[in-house]
Amino acid sequence: MRLHRHRDQHARPGPQHPRLAARRDYPASVTTASGLDIHQLHADADRDGITKLVVGAIVHTDGQVLILRRSAEDTFMAGIEELPSGGVEPGENLLTALERELAEEIGWTGPLTLDPGFVTHFDYISGSGRKARQYTFGLAHHGRPIVLSTEHTAHRWLHPADLTDSDVTDETAQVIRDWTAA
């Protein structure tokens, strides 16, 4: 498993947050067909004092990455470009949350085939002030239609070489560079 780590400079290990503990309703070992140990990713977040988990996806085709434009009416980071992503809800593991978020944000349903061994993450402070970690997985587009939710107003395919011509955050740009290098 290749795990690219981007740690918050101010990260401090801490006790497991009670809301995260409620999310561990799955077997002690969940390993995907692509070789990712989901339990270990959750354990890493617990160890690092993370209180909010987020999942994201690098949906790619022909070397380009799907980018969504967040609605200008959104209360958090309105109008930015981002990867499909969203929070892990109580009772979900990272993969269940990823499936739900892709269904909600781009209309994809059914099983997902993740890029073998690729996951990266970054830490940040959420809009509610919680220490958050976004785990981002890669998966191929395979020609599926993109159906946007009301959370987003547009989508486009971005070549990683054109990151400077985008409105993605520095963290998202680094995630895309990690995927390109993998």
Image (cartoon, rainbow, N blue to C red):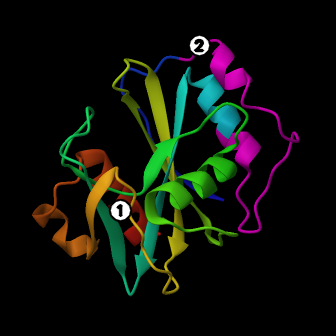
Residue assigned mark 2: 14
Residue drawn 72% across the image and 30% down it = 23
The stretch in magenta equals: 13-41
Instruction: Name the image quarter holding residue 173.
Output: bottom left
- Badge 1 or badge 2: first in the primary sequence: 2
Residue drawn 71% across the image and 48% down it = 38
Check if mark 1's residue and mark 2's residue have beta carbons within 8 Å.
no
Disc 2 secondary structure class? loop
Determine whether 159 is above or below 83 in the image. below
Q: Nearer the viewer, residue 22 or 58?
A: 22
Looking at the rendered structure, the kind of residue marked 1 is Ile
Q: Horizontal and vertical percent for residue 152?
A: 30, 55
Residue assigned mark 1: 176
Residue drawn 16% across the image and 55% down it = 167
Task: State the quadrant of the N terminus.
Answer: bottom right
Residues under labels 1 and 2: Cα distance? 29 Å
Q: Horizontal and vertical percent for residue 79?
A: 18, 48
- In the shown orientation, is residue 177 left or right of residue 47? left
Determine whether 64 is above or below 18 in the image. below
- In the shown orientation, is residue 167 left or right of residue 113? left
- In the shown orientation, is residue 162 left or right of residue 120? left
**Looking at the magenta stretch, what is its main secondary structure?**
loop
- In the shown orientation, is residue 69 left or right of residue 17? left
Mark 2: few/some/many CA within 10 Å (<14, 14-19, 20+): few
Residue drawn 48% across the image and 87% down it = 143
Instruction: Name the image quarter holding residue 118.
Output: bottom right
